[in-house]
Structures are given as C-alpha cells and as structure tokens.
Image (cartoon, rainbow, N blue to C red):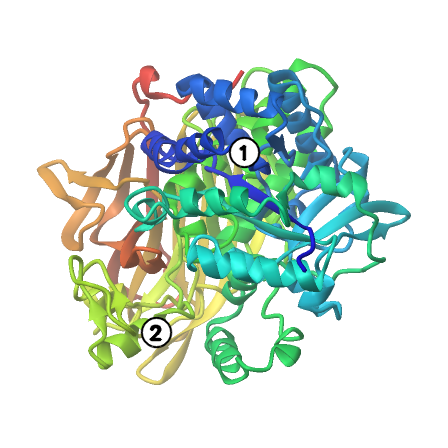
Amino acid sequence: MTHRLTLSLVIHNHQPVGNFDFVFEEATRRAYDPLLDLLERHPVVRLSLHYTGPLYDWLTVHRPDHLDRLRALVARGQVELLTGAYYEPILVAIPDADKIGQIRKMTRFLRETFGCEPTGAWLAERVWEPHLPKPLAEAGVRYTVLDDTPFKMAGLTDDDLFGPYVTEEQGRTLTVFGNVMYLRYAIPWRPVDEVMAWLREQAEAHPGGVAVMGDDGEKFGLWPGTWDHCWGETAWMDRFFAALETNGDWLVTRPLGEVAAEMKPLGRVYLPCASYEEMMHWALLPDDFAAFKRLREEFADRPDLLRFVKGGHWRSFLARYDEVNQMHKKMLWVSRKVHAMPEGSERDRALDHVWAAQCNCGYWHGLFGGIYLFHIRVANYAHLIAAEEIADRSTSRGVWARVERGDLDADGHEEVVLNTDRQVLTFKPSYGGALVEWDRRRQRYNLLNTMTRRREGYHRELLAAVEEGRILLPGQEDRPGGVRVKEPDVHTRLFYDWYRRVSLLDHFLHPETTLETFYQARYGEQGDFVNQPYTVQVREGGEGVALRLARDGSVWVNDRRVPMRVEKVVEVVAGSDDLRARYRLTNLGEAPVSVRFAVEWNWGIVGGGELREEKGAIGGLDEMGEWAGVSRFLIVPRSPEVGDIAFSLTPSATLWHFPLEVISNSEAGYERVYQGTCTLLWWDLRLEPNCPWEATFLATLLPCDPSDLRTERE
C-alpha cells in the first residue's frame, strides 16, 4: 500500500548587482527560460519560485516576455512566488531596518507586478541566526526554508524533517521547513528512477508528510555541463516532471506556501547559527578547512556523529578577509548616515543605493568566486559611494572638507576619514598609518579596491594534484581524482602576503631585495613600520584638511638597531580631486645609516590598464616591471569611467610594479584572477643623524568623459 506524500520544490534564481549583461542573458537562456518551458509543458507540476531583485530589474528591461510568462503561471496557480530581501543580502549582516525595508520592497514589487501576496521568503545563502524570526515576522513573512544542517545540529534527524516547525524570537513566530539534503544532491544528478524510488519510500515512512527541496536555479542549465544533462539529449528535467505526473496517485507537488498554510507544525525548534554545509566549510581557516574535510571523510558512515560537526560560521568571512570587513563596515557606516536623513525622495534614493550595495556576493568566498569577483566589489562600492554622497550633500552644501573619526571597521581602533565634496579617504593609523579606501565620488569608484593574496583551504588540493599528476588541462576529459585547471602552471603563482595590500605603506627593504622577491612576498623587511601603529594629528580649517601620521620605530642594519622616525602628512582640499602627501624620515640614532626606503601604493583598477611615463608606456597593470628615475607617471585604466591618475613625486625614485593575482577555484577549475596592481617607489638613502630626508607625492585624479560616468538609479 502506498501513501500520499507532498513534494515542494523551491527554485531560487539569482544574479548579483553589477554582474555582466551577458551573464544575465546566458542564465536566462540556459536556465530560467527552460524552466518556464518545462512548467508550461507539465501544468500538473506546481512549485515555488524565487527571483532576486537584480534579476527582476534586468528582466524588466531586457526580457519582459519572460515576466509575462511567469505572470501567467502565477495566475493559474501553478507557481507561487517567494519574497525576500530585494537585493539578496545576507540578512544577518545588515541592520534590521534594512532587512525589513528590503523585504517590503520585494513584496510590494511582487504585488504590483504579479498580483500576488507572498507569505514565504527565501534567505540568501540560507544563512540563519536565531534573531531572524522577529524582523522577518515584522516584514510580513510567515515561513522560510532552511537547509537541514541547523535542524540536525539542533538534534533532529532526517526522519524528523517531513513537516514544518515553528520557531520564535521575543514571541514573534516563524514557520521553518528543512531542505532535504538527499533531494538537493539528487536533483538533477541521480537517475530519475532512483529519485522516485526514494520518494516512494518516504511516502510509506511518512504518510501525509512533505519533502522539501530548495536550491539554485542556475544548476539547471547554467553550471558547466548541466544544460545537456537537464535540457539536451539527456532531458533529465522533462523525464523527472513526467514521472511526477505519472505518479500523481501517491505523490503530489505543491507550492510550499500552501503547505505552510495547511500543515500544523510538528513542534517547536530553536536553530543554531548555520547555512548550507558547503558554506560552513568555506568559512573555515585553511588548516581547519583541510581538517574538516578529513573528518567528514573519516566518519562518512556515521551520520549520527556528523550531524553535530558544523564547520564554520558565516560571520567568519568578516574576520578572515579585511576587504570583506572593510566593505561591510562601510555599508553600516553609510546606512547610519542615510537613515539619519529626513524622510523624502532623496532619502529613498539613497536607501536604494545602500540596499543594492548589500547584495551578498561580494561579502564571502566559496566555489563561486564571491569577494574575488572584482566587478561585484566595484558595483557594491559604487552604490555605497553614491548613497554616502547623497547623505553628505543633505547636510553640506557647496564644497566642503572635513574630518570624520570613529572605529569604522569595528576592530577597537579609530579610523580617520578625510571627507570632501569630491573624494573620501579613509586612514587606519593603527595599521601603518595606511590609506585603506579612496573613494572618487564623481566616478563612484574606490581606487584602492584590491585583494590581499591569501592561502585558501583548497590550495592544498591543487598542490597535491600537481604532485600526484592528477591535473586536468582545458580540453582533457574528466577522470577520477582529476583536478581541473585553466593553465598548466597556475600552481606556480601561489604567493601569500604577510600584510594587507593597501596604500601609503612604509617599507625599509633589505638591500638584496629584488622585484621578483618582493612580488613573491619573500623578501627581507628591516623596519617595523608596515603594519604597526602610527600617532595621528588632524588639522582643519580654511579650504582643506590635513592628517599627520608619525611613528618612532626601528630599522635593523647589520644586526644593529637604528631608531627611525617616519612622518607623513596627507592634505586634501575642498573642490579638488588631488591628494598631496609629504614624507619626512629622520635618523634618530648617533651614526649615519644606509637604508632602502619604499612607499607602497596598491591600485584596484578593474579590468587593468597600463602605466605610462612621459617617454611612453611603462607596462600593463597586469605586468611586472622596473623603471628607474621616475618622477612622473600616469595610471590609465582600461575602463574609461574610472578616469586616469597622474602621479608625480620628488625626488625621483625607482618604480616596481606587478599584478596582484589570486588563485581561485570555481566550478570550471583553478585559475588566476587579477585583483589589482602594486606600485612600489623606493630610494637608496644615506641618512645622517637628525638630518631629515623629505619626499613629496602628488596624485591628481584626472577628469574623464562625462558620457562614461555611471548614471544614478532613479
């Protein structure tokens, strides 16, 4: 005898803010359109769909026919649309006011566009923390779907997940469904007959229950190799939907909202912080990443134990990557400014920029790029810069220059911001007196949007595959244990920085340091200035502001400690795009000393470009090079909307430049990914006691063609 089982499929379609048009187009053609085709061919199969706001925005402009077809499926009750935060942020990472505002924006859009009233919400990356029921309920959400991982961490088993549970925060309740891991891995990878046999077993074991499968729509056609499997000759999805129709006597497909409205909760549950299993693995430190993988392999046959082994925590990305934390805390800083604005159209416009900047893809790293996707970081910063400018202009008219201070990055140390009508510069006195963010307001661009080269947990797998001869080059067929790479020597580019790649970093280099050893971060540092604290003084008044940073530190020469003072004064002026920096080095010792002093600037120029000197090109931003006697050079981005940067210095110096490239893993294999360019300017000096040496830098942001500038979202 068979028993009736409900299958609730939840498909989540997402493209991030700032993604390329061709990716939106390809994803729609290879994954989103075929799914609508499938539903139209199989009207008996009913399910829930979630599209994110950036995807809705693109479809509205480029593919309104797709939305028309989706509207028809909703009208006939075949598809339920889920709400969620409009720009797909990690909800736990944004203020409650923004959580509620973004969800209400999506709900309003669905109501006005499709005539539906959504009751369920999709959570970005299924990241869960126990405080979420309250803001979700306040935004009108009645239910959501989470991976089975937090349910198992709370003590439930696979057999306990065939119905909803209720959870709460401060008495505000939320219905939660467990996303069954077997179905997430089996659809569409296992044979259709095997999936149907599993569902029949569950129908007999859990009569009247519901099995939930929620996952990304991109795996149905966009991921490598999936289009042929899902829609081509194999036609897995058609065969699966046909099987669902054929077995309708014991298996029914229903949108999850209907189930949530009718099925009583199986009980009350309190779920720990969690996401899907892979995300919690990615969040671990490199050594822990490998240890966790070994542990899961060792206890693969002990699911009763593994359910308590959770891996890492999403917020660990904020601790692991200074660049993630910088962007996240900038977002919180700007959000506070915007929420302090008086209500009105300008505040609404600024809020929408803040919300767009909260799109999650640039705030973590896993198999799909995340923070290493340069263009995604650029888009997030563009919206943050736009929002902050709107907020600042609401309190400051005309031109201005002022100083803002506070612990922006929440590390217990104060940062100093030089804020003008044309640019915003953020300094970190506690870390080398470094310039960590330089926002060009008119272009909406952070010039220092680079990434430090870090060891990742998956790098060990690459090195092991090289040693064991398991590398698969482009065009080679898959084989068991094979590790795919996009170029044969990619493993030789694994270099790891011991400090953060920002700007105005001060080095005392061992005289035997070469461009190659500095590029590889395998050189001798003779000073204690790069990442150590500087004192800070601020001067305000007149048309500009100035910041003096100083450190009395040490330089070790021939096993002798030489006390050394480094001072740098940075000045910006209202109405100007220039940055002027003046350096002074003072030997505080009693004898002369010979040193090689260097100042490092790292440039986050998306798409690269080139360096030019008066006599011609020096080299590409993605190339390594050395140039002596440089007093002026030009940074020319390949993307014209960024604008050129003219750089002059006195006295002339030797210039080293090289690309910052990380080795990232993706579904298509290991690859080098450009993350910015380092320029190092250095001098061989002989410093007499108490006879200061001085240098001056002037960086001028040249205007670009107004037609190349980004237009604001209205």
What is the secondary structure assignment of the residue under circle 1?
strand
**Mark 1: amino acid:** Tyr
Q: Residue at x 45, y 29 (%)?
A: 444
Q: Residues within 10 Å of mark 2 (few under 14, many from 20)?
A: few
Residue ranking furthest to the left: 615
**Quarter in which the C terminus is drawn:** top right
> Mark 2 = which residue?
461
> Mark 1 = which residue?
51
**Quarter in which the N terminus is drawn:** bottom right
- In this orientation, which residue lies closer to the viewer: 673 or 477? 477
- In this orientation, which residue lies closer to the viewer: 505 or 309? 309
> Residue 71: which quarter of the image?
top right
Q: Residue 615: where, in percent of width, then height?
A: 8, 37
What is the secondary structure assignment of the residue under circle 2?
helix
Q: Nearer the viewer, mark 2 or mark 1?
A: 1
Cβ atoms at labels 2 and 1 below 8 Å apart = no
Q: Is residue 18 above or below residue 206?
A: above
Left or right of 533 on screen, residue 34: left
**Mark 2: amino acid:** Glu
Distance between the alpha carbons at the discs numbered 2 and 1: 34 Å
Q: Residue at x 47, y 48 (%)?
A: 436
Q: Is residue 703 above or below residue 102?
A: above
> Residue 457: which quarter of the image?
bottom left
Residue 380 seen in render? yes
Left or right of 619 on screen, residue 588: right
- In this orientation, which residue lies closer to the viewer: 184 or 570? 184
Q: Residue 537: where, in percent of width, then height?
A: 59, 48
Q: Residue at x 40, y 22 (%)?
A: 710
Q: Residue 215: where, in percent of width, then height?
A: 53, 49
- In this orientation, which residue lies closer to the viewer: 423 or 130? 130
